[in-house]
Amino acid sequence: MRTRSVLTLLATAALLTLTACEGADTGAKPTQVKDGRGKDGSGSDTAVLPDLVGKGLQSAQDQAQAAGFRRLASHDALGRGRTQAFDRNWKVCSQTPTPGTRPTNTRVDFGAVKLTEDCPAKGDSGERGPTKAGGTMPAFTGKSVKVAREALDRSTSLTVKDASGSGRMVLVESNWQVCAQDPAAGAKLDGRPVRLEAVKFSEGCP
C-alpha cells in the first residue's frame, strides 16, 4: 500500500508540472518601460520623438537626446548654407522625421534659422537650396553664393561680383544673395565659366 501511495503522489506531481508548462507563454513580447521606450518588430529600440518645432536648437537637441535619439543633424532652413556653430543662437523651424514612435537609431534633422529671423513658409521645397547642377544651369537668384558654389561642379570657373557697384569683396558667401547670373537658368553647362552678381541679404538687389 505504501508503494502505491508513493507512486500516486509522483504521478500527480508530474501531471501538475506538465499542466504548468503548457500554460506558460513562451512567445517573445516587446519590452515596455515607463518612459515610452520599447522594441519594434525587428528588436530595435524604439522611443517617442517629441515635437520640437519652435524650440531653441540647443534645447531641441537636448530633448531629442533625452528621449533616446543620438543621430542628430541640422541645416539652414533659409537655404543659405550657413553652419549652426552656436546652437543657442538658432531656433527650429522643421524636423525630419515628424513626431511619433521611431527607432532610436533614426537620423533626426532640424531645419533652423537664427533667433532674429522668420521661418520659411511651410512646404518650401527649396530650403536646402539647389541640388547639384549637373549639365544644366540652376536658378540661383535669391540663393546664397555659398549654395550656388556648392551646386556647381568643382571644375567650374566661378566669378562673383558685388552687384551694388561698390566693389566689395564677397568674403562670407552665405551672407550674400545672388541677384543675377550668367549663363541663365536652364542653359547648358559644358565647362562654361559662371558669373554671379550678388548683394548682402540685408540689402535689396539693384
Image: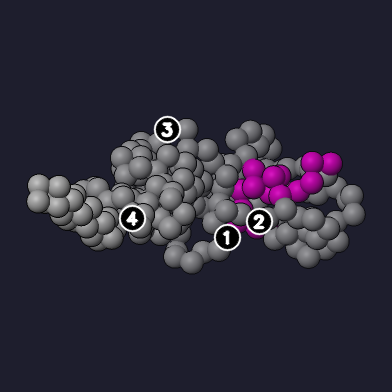
Q: Over which residues does the magenta segment extend?
A: 140-155
User: Is disc 1 surrounded by few (<14), some (14 to 19) or many (20+) residues within 10 Å?
Assistant: few
Residue type, label 2:
Pro
Q: Is residue 168 above or below residue 184?
A: above
Q: Report the colour scheme.
A: one colour
Residue 32 x %, y %: 27, 51
Observer-side mark, 1 or 4, equals 4
Residue type, label 4:
Thr
- Residue 126's disc number: 1
Residue 175 x %, y %: 56, 42
Q: In the rendered image, is residue 115 in sight?
A: no
Horizontally, is 129 left or right of 190 in the view?
A: left
Q: Say what secondary structure mark 1 lies in.
A: loop
- Residue 26's disc number: 4
Q: Say what secondary structure mark 2 lies in.
A: loop
Q: Distance of mark 1 from mark 4, alpha carbons?
A: 52 Å
User: Is disc 3 surrounded by few (<14), some (14 to 19) or many (20+) residues within 10 Å?
Assistant: few
Horizontally, is 190 left or right of 27 in the view?
A: right
Q: Distance of mark 4 from mark 2, alpha carbons?
A: 54 Å
* Quarter of the image with the C terminus in it: bottom right
What residue sits right under mark 3 in the picture?
A: 86
